[in-house]
Image (cartoon, rainbow, N blue to C red):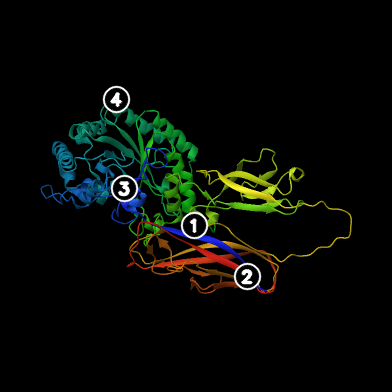
Amino acid sequence: MHRSLGAALAVTAFACAAPSTARAQFPVYSKDKWLGSISEFTRPLFSQYFNQVTPENGGKWGVAAGTTRTAAMRWGQLDTAYNYARDNGMKFNFHVLLWGNQQPTWMATLPPEEQLAEIKKWYAAVAERYPRIEWLQVVNEPTWDPPDGSTPKNAGANFASSGNYVQALGGAGETGYDWIRTAFRLARQYFPNTKLMLNDVAITGQTASTDEYLKIINILKAENLIDVVGLQAHAFEFIPDNPNVPSIPGHPYDPHASMAVHKANLDRIAATGVPIQVTELDLDGFAVGGVPGDEMQLAHYRRVVPTFWEHPRVEGITLWGWRQPNHWRNAQNAPIVLSNDTPKPAGLWLYNYVRGIAPTIGAGQTFTVADGNANRVGTVAASDWASQIGRPHLRTFTWRITGGNAAGIFAIAPSTGELTVAKPELLDELTTYGLKVRVSDGFHESAEADVTVTTADLANVVDQPVGGTVAATLALSFSGPVSFGAFMPGVTRDYERSVDATVTSTAGDATLSVSDPATETPGRLRNGAFALARPVEATVAGAFAPIGATPLTLHGYTGPASQDVLTIRLRQSIDASEPLRTGTYAKTFTFTLSTTTP
């Protein structure tokens, strides 16, 4: 006698949409905020992740200026960034007019009056060539690295490129920062329609640094010269005991400062009424105490980013690099995307976080209570970015019952989603209960989902000889649907995911197999009329094999099994030359648990 139990499992993925589709998702997280970055603008993922462009080095005076006072300007890098922003409907953040580093070396020997003339020429040239700058960083790092050659790092061989022109702009003067005020007065003159920004590093971690920064902000605010306050957010400001960051002389910073301290000082700056931007965010990923580097980086992102992103005065965040190997802190594992365009956990989390993408509870989950004396019902399943890459331990779920449980008959474990019978005395037999549940990942909560619990004939126990029989049973369930995530056009890659199958069998020779009942392109994911070139492959142990119309045996049992969990691995291979159609590729496969000796 042959008996079998079938279960359908939906396998889906989506092809990366065109950049315009990605940009249409902004503003993100239901807020008028943006996420920007620098470098590698033409990579496919840039327009998927970001909608603001900042030039990393091209806008620094020493990079754009000619090698001599009379030589031609070198606009190449700056043109690339500016034109990409304009062509793709992204906002452009100019970095930076004046700074105490990467300045024209020929400025060092000029008298102050000629230095001022060159500064004005620099302003005028930028204003003429780039008329559509949304934000202009006028002065960068005035408390850390002013253009006066005074800091230890700008001594000796670095003096010529340190921009020793503070006196040309009026020096300290009566305010202590007259030179900054002059720089902004000139900027307002040359860029009347552009929002002017002050930018600095290592501010919110220390009250004294915030005090000094507020002094400059208020000097500028008194003459309506400042439109945006910039705050850098580099790894050395937030990661204690970072072996990749040496002590930096000449400026106080405290990586041990709690995020509560950063929040308090952020609030003080926000109280000025001037909008705020986080201009240069990077967080390293080095291993600590056996925890892998990419997991540590994820923890840093979760800890640091929400403090700034959630603040109502913060307009947006710019990542100071995003992809291997061209990130300026590549050696410190700071990129959030690998060189093969695979996002790291921090990158996946950030993508979902800023868009408010919450976990998804699988639809149609039904559980049966067959024993009135057993309190366990079953575990509700949900998926998110971490489960999609097979690393669910990277996130923490919190579950709650939100409806259908007025009498408190059922309870749900907050951390696991396990449903139990809390009040068995109120449990009715042969009854269907409809519960509503939600799950949060700590940042966003899922939509409310329906979960059904049915009860069997819950017979009372009586004093009599006890015996029992075991009915022929085959039971098969899955932890949830499977998504391969985003298929990247033009990239040769194997996409792998896994799903847990729970098997209960009273037979002696149960076999688990998978097949595709579809008559067209069996085993191949479809997107309307389009199908992938290769079928999905599957395995429980050993080599992958393609799924097709003929059942593919995944696992065999030589005895009964109870709640045995099998991890089924699925793989989709795509070549760089394979054309992909925008949309969702999907297919429902049939998994069969069968036996000939029930």
**Is 264 placed left or right of 42 in the picture?**
right
As displayed, is residue 153 above or below residue 389? above
Do tag 2 and tag 1 residues touch (Cβ < 8 Å)?
no
- Could you tell me the amino acid type at mark 2? Ser
Label 2 vs label 1: CA separation? Answer: 29 Å
The local crowd at label 1, few if under 14, some if 14 to 19, many if 20 or more residues have their Cα within 10 Å, is some
Residue position marked by numbered label 1 in the rendering: 388
Residue position marked by numbered label 4 in the rendering: 222
**Is 525 placed left or right of 164 in the picture?**
right
Residue 296 appears in the picture as rendered:
yes
From the image, state whether disc 3 or disc 1 is nearer to you: 1
- Could you tell me the amino acid type at mark 1? Gln
In percent of width and height, residue 220 lies at 29, 29
> Which badge, 3 or 2, comes first in the chain's sequence?
3
Label 2 vs label 4: CA separation? Answer: 80 Å
As displayed, is residue 269 above or below residue 387? above
> Which badge, 3 or 1, comes first in the chain's sequence?
3
Residue position marked by numbered label 2 in the rendering: 594
Q: Secondary structure at mark 1?
A: helix
Do tag 3 and tag 2 residues touch (Cβ < 8 Å)?
no
From the image, state whether disc 1 or disc 4 is nearer to you: 1
